[in-house]
Amino acid sequence: MGVTPPLIEVGLVVAAQGLRGELRVLPSSDFAERFLKPGPRWLQTADEPPRTVELLRGRCLSRKGLYGIRLKGIATRNQAEALVRYRLLADGSTRPALAAGEFHLLDLEGLEVRLDPAGPALGTVVDLLHGGNDLLEIRLRHGGQSVLVPFVEAIVPQVHVAEGWILLCPPTGLLPITAQPTPADAIGSPHQPES
């Protein structure tokens, strides 16, 4: 039995496509090659370890924002339907190369969220939700609750992965009032609340 490489989630099987075992996958990766380039992938549910599968081919279902993929050994609609709600994983050590100024969305998890580049942390990115628009789930330091923030340039204009933080410019009403730092937490204050 081979060693399983570090895995990252790249999509979710959401439905069977047609009668011959094709799967519809909702992507959580911006890299099309994760769904188009043949090779090893993994499937996993919450209560099972990942299992290796072979991607034979894929295609973009452009009007739906989904991919249609064919896996070796999945030849009927019933076999495909049995895989609905499985997560599709790929080898995390083969992440596609990035251009200057780009970053992998998974690298955002754990970053501090600030309202001012030199200010205190408002919270921490704890998850990413994918759909029509990507959403950052941010756990707030004040109040301890989580909020969902659209990951768009107007609201998140700066991302500093190497420095460990992102800048947030929320529109009025996006954050609860209790999330705002108190004057004691202002820049230069010797007092910082416990995380």
Image: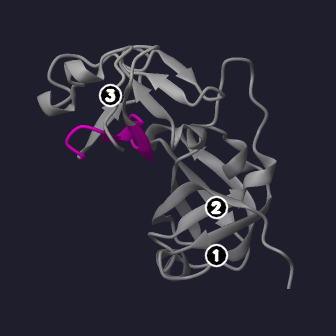
Q: 121 or 40: which is nearer to us?
A: 121
In the image, residue 163 above or below residue 84: above
Identify the residue position indicated by label 2 in the image: 89
Q: Residue furthest right?
A: 2
**In the image, which residues are magenta?**
124-144
**Amino acid type of disc 2?**
Leu
Q: Residues within 10 Å of mark 3 (few under 14, many from 20)?
A: few
Find residue 101 and report its horizontal and vertical position in percent: 67, 18
State yes or no: residue 134 in magenta.
yes
Q: Is residue 143 left or right of residue 188?
A: left
Quarter of the N terminus within the rendering: bottom right
Find residue 163 and report its horizontal and vertical position in percent: 61, 26
**CB within 8 Å, label 2 to label 1:** yes
Distance between the Cα atoms at labels 3 and 2?
A: 43 Å
**Amino acid type of disc 3?**
His
x 35%, y 18%: residue: 115
Find residue 57 and report its horizontal and vertical position in percent: 73, 57
Mark toward the viewer: 3 or 2:
3
Q: Residue furthest bottom?
A: 1
Q: Is residue 162 at least partly visible in the picture? A: yes
Q: Secondary structure at mark 2?
A: strand
Q: 39 or 157: which is nearer to us?
A: 157
Checking the image for residue 50, the label placed there is 1
x 24%, y 25%: residue: 181
Checking the image for residue 191, the label placed there is 3
**Amino acid type of disc 1?**
Pro
